[in-house]
Image (tube, rainbow, N blue to C red):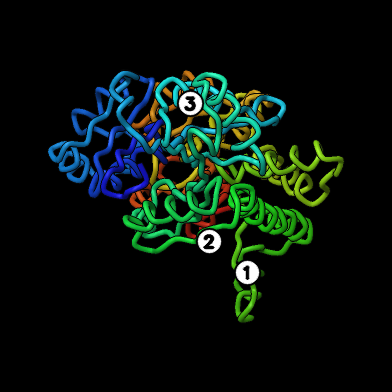
Amino acid sequence: MRKIEDVKICVIGLGYVGLPLARLFSTRYATIGFDKNRGRVEALMKGQDKTLEVDEQLLRKALDNGFVCTDDIALIKDCNFYIVAVPTPVDCNNNPDLTPLYGASETVGKVISKGDIVVYESTVYPGVTEEECVPVIEKVSGLRLNKDFYAGYSPERINPGDKQHTVEKIRKITSGSTPEIGEFVNKIYGSVIEAGTHLAPSIKVAEAAKVIENSQRDINIAFVNELSKIFTILGIDTQEVLAAAATKWNFLPFKPGLVGGHCIGVDPYYLAQCAQRHGYNPEIILAGRRMNDSMGKYVAEETIKCMLKKGIQVLGAKLLILGFTFKENCPDVRNTKVIEIVRTLEEYNLDVSVYDPWADVALAKSEYGIDITNQLPDEKYDALILAVSHDKFRSINVVDLLNDTHVIYDVKGFLSHEIIDKRL
């Protein structure tokens, strides 16, 4: 098969990662997108992407040019280059949950033929592709790796909501189960990725490179989160300290905040468990996770302290949270840490409202069991927490939403310094 002109691509998983990738590949290759969620498929075939990662015009153009989305496994049997882009979450105990990967691998096993290639994009710890996923394909298909079919790994680097660093503009790591396959996979990706590619010497190296990218960011953010706690005790403004330190040419400009989402708040647990399985107990990685996972509760309790200092009755107080998604200007609520703020405030019996014009109200209810609104409430509140720095919040005069005696806590350093009581 290994001729670039013969490639027919199937992308399995049409979420934040899979859809932009499939749309991009469709500009050069015959491409089918597969997702088991029929509702998602039907919406995409109408040119509607609720993740907002693919511009509607680009999606419709791709559909007009032959790009197809389906939940029918029979329609992907003629493909010969399968890309798996399903989520890799953690469970309630922060253990890696490979269930979506196992399911996608079973799907591949049902359709893969001799000479085909399957490339995984999902974030995993080193060894998952060859030791966890490939055996599932072999068992279902009866084929053998590097004899009947081949594998690769090219970790996703999608940044949800980022319209500048889109998939084709971010350099891509590639790898293959043999040197020849690595070169071929690299050639396929390189034909559509404008920023270029980096061919790793092995699948495990590519897996490891991905999982440390976000672990590094997690640790750096944990450091400044700890600084924020220290400087709060000392009565120093953390943002002013960071601005002063940033005048040094090699100072890294990380800021304190909530660390959620599908990558930074998850990937370090994959690396940590991998290390533990091999007899090493990671210290810095897990310390960073503990620090960042504590920030939601910390923000809530600091807000309550401010209320008490102003003589505001906490029990039954009305508090408004601005923002629920895990980051600004996108609808993604996966692993949002704003929920930790909500839960802690509710423990103190505050009456909490959450306003987010981006978030899916129904999804927030089904995933987290809370009611949020896309409409700015017409009420007066005793306190307000700016949790996510959506651009849409710039037009809000937050003081107009509050009683005369009130507290404003700014998690993101987004609001005017003159009107806030405290910020991270």
Q: Gap in Å between the C-alphas at discs 1 and 3?
A: 38 Å
The image quadrant of residue 124 is top right
From the image, which quarter does the N terminus lie in? top left
Q: Residue at x 66, y 56 (%)?
A: 216
Residue in front for this viewpoint, 232 or 64: 64
Q: Gap in Å between the C-alphas at discs 2 and 3?
A: 49 Å
Percent position of residue 40, x then y: 32, 24
Determine which residue is flagged by label 1. Answer: 252
Disc ID at residue 104 = 3
Q: Amino acid at mark 2?
A: His
- Kindly tell me whether residue 399 is visible in this rendering: no
Say whether disc 1 or disc 3 marks the residue closer to the N-terminus: 3
From the image, which quarter does the C terminus lie in? bottom right
Say whether disc 2 or disc 3 marks the residue closer to the N-terminus: 3
Q: Residue at x 51, y 40 (%)?
A: 151
Q: Is residue 127 above or below residue 421?
A: above
Q: Amino acid at mark 3?
A: Ala
Q: Are marks 1 and 3 in contact (CB under 8 Å)?
A: no
Q: Residue at x 49, y 48 (%)?
A: 154
Mark 3: secondary structure = helix
Mark 2: secondary structure = loop
Determine which residue is flagged by label 2. Answer: 417
- Kindly tell me whether residue 312 is visible in this rendering: yes
